[in-house]
C-alpha cells in the first residue's frame, strides 16, 4: 500500500511512521470495502423494496379473483332462476294436460257395488 505513495513522501518517513501509515491505509482499505458492501446491501434492499412497492400484480390478481367469483355467483343465480322457471313451466304444462284429460274423458256411470254375501237382491 505504501508502494502507491510518491517517492518523496516515502523517503521522508522513518520506519515507525511507515508502519503506522501502512496500518492506517490497511484500516482505510478494509473500511472502504466494508463501506462498499454496506452501501451495496443498502442499495439492493432499497431497490427490492422499491420494486415490491411498485409491483401491484398481486393486488390486481386478488381483485380479478374477486370479480371472477362475483361473476360466477351471478351466473349460478341466473342458472338457478332458469331452472326454477323451467320447473314451473313443466308443472303448469302437466296441470294443463291433466285438466284436458279430465275434460276429454267421458263420464262413466257409476255401477253400484254388489250386495254383501248372504243378502239377497229384491
Image (cartoon, rainbow, N blue to C red):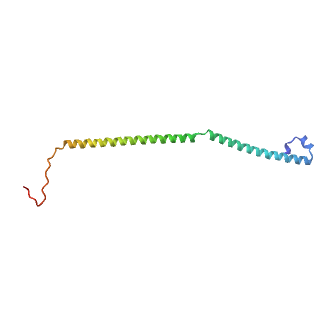
Toward the left, the furthest residue is 122
- Image spot of residue 38 (x, y percent): 74, 45
Which residue: 54% across, 42% down?
62
Q: Nearer the viewer, residue 46 or 88?
A: 88
Toward the top, the furthest residue is 54
81 horizontally vs 2: left or right: left
Q: Nearer the viewer, residue 82 or 45?
A: 82
Look at the image and tell me in which quarter the N terminus lies: top right
Q: Nearer the viewer, residue 120 or 85?
A: 120
Toward the bottom, the furthest residue is 118
101 horizontally vs 65: left or right: left
Look at the image and tell me in which quarter the C terminus lies: bottom left
- Image spot of residue 105 (x, y percent): 18, 44
Which residue: 31% across, 41% down?
89
Residue 57 image-quadrant placement = top right
28 horizontally vs 9: left or right: left
Residue 13 image-quadrant placement = top right
Numbered label tally:
0
Which residue: 30% across, 43% down?
91
- Image spot of residue 16 (x, y percent): 91, 48
- Image spot of residue 75 (x, y percent): 43, 40
Which residue: 38% across, 41% down?
81
Amino acid at each position: 500500500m505504501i508502494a502507491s505513495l510518491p517517492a518523496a513522501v516515502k523517503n521522508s518517513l522513518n520506519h515507525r511512521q511507515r508502519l503506522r501509515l501502512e496500518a492506517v491505509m490497511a484500516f482505510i482499505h478494509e473500511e472502504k470495502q466494508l463501506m462498499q458492501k454496506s452501501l451495496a446491501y443498502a442499495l439492493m434492499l432499497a431497490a427490492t423494496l422499491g420494486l415490491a412497492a411498485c409491483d401491484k400484480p398481486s393486488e390486481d390478481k386478488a381483485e380479478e379473483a374477486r370479480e371472477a367469483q362475483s361473476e360466477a355467483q351471478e351466473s349460478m343465480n341466473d342458472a338457478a332462476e332458469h331452472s326454477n322457471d323451467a320447473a314451473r313451466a313443466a308443472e303448469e304444462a302437466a296441470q294443463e294436460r291433466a285438466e284436458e284429460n279430465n275434460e276429454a274423458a267421458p263420464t262413466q256411470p257409476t255401477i253400484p257395488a254388489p250386495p254383501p254375501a248372504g243378502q239377497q237382491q229384491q
